[in-house]
Image: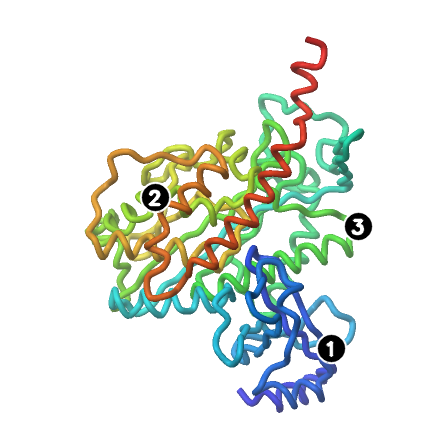
Amino acid sequence: MDLIKFIEENGIEFIDLKYVDLIGNLYHLTLTKEKFLKIKEKGIGFDGSSVFGFSLKEGSDLLLLPDTEDFFIDPIYERKTLSFFSNIFLKKEPFPKDPRQILKKTVDFFKKEVNVDSILFRTELEFYLLEEADFNFNKLNGYYHFSSEEKKERNVKLPYEKSYHQTPPFDRYYELRQEIVIRAKEIGIDIKYHHHENGQFGQEEIETEFYSPLKLSDIILILKYLIRNLAKKNNKIVTFLPKLFYQEAGNGLHFHFQILKENRNLLINENGELSEEGRYFINGVFTHLKTLAAFSNPSSNSYRRLASGFEAPQILAIGIGTRTTVFRIPDYLEEKEKTIEFRLPDALSNPYLLISAFLLAGFDGIKKKMVTPQNYSLPKNLEESLNSLEEDNQFLLINDIFNQEIIEEWLRLKKEELKLIKEFPHPVEYLLYFNL
């Protein structure tokens, strides 16, 4: 596509360069059209020391270079703005901590070493829409307060009530969800469907179609960006927190994936079951699962979702049709359409790092023809996952895809979070022990 011609024909006034920090926050830098045309080949500098997780041993200057194959007319801005995802460079070389380029290196390496044609992912993005969300914690005060248009008159679920796929008028946020999907479609994101989820206080789900790992990771960031901005426009509040409410369904970020060679899913055989390569791949993930969880479930709150039921994966197995296992092969698909669903992750993950670690764990299984590990289990908390990352990270370092500096920075950031959480008394402790 002639980019300059596209900019002129569509009346573009501004260019937005979007990029991602180490933990998955989205950032942006806005240029005039005229300035962008001058720098689009050589990039523009920014202060890397001010970006979360991008600490540098020497200096702080980094370079943003737009990915000219990945852009959209941004529906959030009033002025006509073209948004690009950008890659990050350090002294004209790819910046090792740039999540997009880590994933690109992973995919290129995996496809070459396993000799496959393409890797495809789609996702189910779950979230809650609320009317109010107020919370604060300090030494003398701590509270949270949420309100929802759904079930606002009572907060007890009756035996016959179900929230999954409920219809208007009970599905109060249908029109907002529809608007999100329309805006996504207008910028080229193919959505499979959307619906109300199991959570009775405004839990929603939007599922995409299949994309390459890099494109899907970009789409997850775009969808979160659209959802937040359109919720704000409609005076609503959104959260992707894995476990928002006690005894209510949590928010996941499930992935369905296919690895294709000559238009055949390498991981599924002609009977719709795991192939030999599929077993090796899954066993690689099971072997490294606690390390992988440091990226797929990167918060203390993530493990409240995993421990609570409500179809959160609790069985370390691959099931046909079941929703309680870490992996699932949907039972309703034709044999040639079979996919594998990975149900562990949540949307607090950085999708670029998550999918990279996931593919590298699977590759390790294929390369070493791994059998099912004897002693393995789901991590019980973030601390257990981080401890595993410290001890079991060699599979991530292959081909210099990750490096020790990235791993050490991830551990440092997450341990700081844990320290803060451990030092604050838990509200339930007051209920249990205050008067003893």
- From the viewer's perspective, is residue 31 above or below residue 53? below
User: Circle 3 sits on which residue?
Assistant: 235
- From the viewer's perspective, is residue 363 above or below residue 18? above
Q: Quadrant of residue 81?
A: bottom right
Residue 269's x, y, as percent?
22, 53
Residue for point 67% across, 85% down: 36
Q: Amino acid at mark 1?
A: Lys
Quick one: label 1 or label 3, which is nearer the N terminus?
A: 1
Badge 2 crowding class, 10 Å Cα cut-off, few under 14, some 14 to 19, many 20 or more, is some
Cα separation between marks 1 and 3:
24 Å
Q: Amino acid at mark 2?
A: Asp
User: Circle 2 sits on which residue?
Assistant: 331
- From the viewer's perspective, is residue 233 above or below residue 297? below
Q: Callout 2: helix, strand or loop?
A: loop
Marks 1 and 2: which is nearer the front? 1
CB contact under 8 Å: marks 2 and 3: no
**Relative side of 115 to 225, left or right:** left
Residue for point 47% across, 67% down: 96
Residue for point 55% across, 63% down: 219
Q: Callout 3: helix, strand or loop?
A: loop
